[in-house]
Image (cartoon, rainbow, N blue to C red):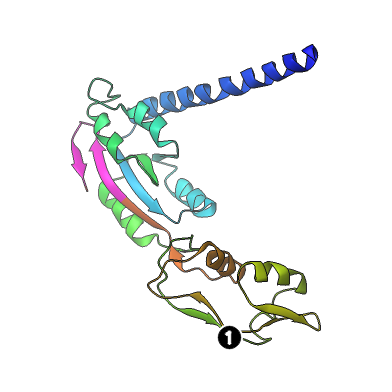
Amino acid sequence: MPITKRKRNQVLTKTKKKTPEKKELLVKKLKQSLKKYQRAIIFQYKNLSTNPLKEIQQAWKADSKLFIGKNKVMQVGLGRNEEQSATKNSYLLSPFLKGETGLLLTNKTLQEIQEYCDTYKIPEFARAGHIANQTIVLKEGIDTLKGFGHSLEPYLRKLGLNTQLINQQIVLNEKYVLAQEGKPLTVEQTKLLRLMDQKLAYLEITPLCVLEKNGTFKKL
């Protein structure tokens, strides 16, 4: 028993040390980067997945640096008040870092960033709560789900479809509203939409405010 207790204490101690170190590193990196770029922009994003994020990072790599996630830690890096401000007026950016937001440090002009955000809209799988912009109804019968293997039938039933197996083919016994225009999608609907490769949402990036290197702040 004493040996077991000592091992557990060592693991817990190591776990506690990692998080503060990562936070401190992020704060340090952010403060250093603030001084290297001409402007800092807080932006809001919707329906952002891994692949588009990588594309954006690659597109902005040459003259920009992107920080996303850990809003409270980034607020510490920027400063939460004038006394804590990392650079002149950087604390003014902190209140905008809430929810799905990120920080872009860049040498690009504000116009370049805004034009990029306006044009970079790609289809994405919708999440639960997304308001459907169209109505999709699955018709009853054998043809609707013929692309799915018979092993998926229990899972489709779990997601709300009234199905059965006939000769190893999944049959939909009654029509099912997969999405209804103007109404929020349920978790089950979003899972079914993903299975059927139906993308009803779009990636959106919206700049919220900008801070120039000279300290000039502007809400957009």
Q: Please name the amino acid that badge 1 sits on.
A: Lys
Splitting the image into 4 quarters, where does residue 103 fall? top left
Above or below for 127 versus 149 = above
The residue lying at 56 percent from left, 65 percent from top is: 188
Q: Position of residue 212 (x, y in %)?
A: 23, 36
Which picture quadrant has residue 13? top right
Number of numbered discs overlaid on the protein picture: 1
The residue sitting at 57% across, 19% down in the picture is 17
Sort mark 1 into few (<14), some (14-19) or many (20+) by Cα contacts within 10 Å. Answer: some
State the residue lying farthest toward the front. 1
Q: Is residue 138 left or right of residue 118?
A: right
Answer left or right for 129 relative to 172. Answer: left
Residue 1, position as x, y percentages in the image: 80, 15
Residue 153 on image: x %, y %: 72, 72
The answer to whether residue 3 shows anywhere in this view is: yes
**Magenta segment, which residues?**
207-219
- Decide whether residue 212 is among the magenta residues: yes
Could you say which is closer to the camera, residue 103 or residue 129?
129
Looking at the picture, tell me which residue is in the foreground, 61 or 56.
56
206 is higher (above) or lower (below) than 209:
below
In the image, 212: left or right of 65? left
What secondary structure is the magenta-colored segment mainly? Answer: strand
Q: Residue at x 45, y 28 (%)?
A: 26
Front residue of this view, candidates 66 and 84? 84
The residue that label 1 is drawn on is 139
Residue at image position (52%, 21%) is: 21
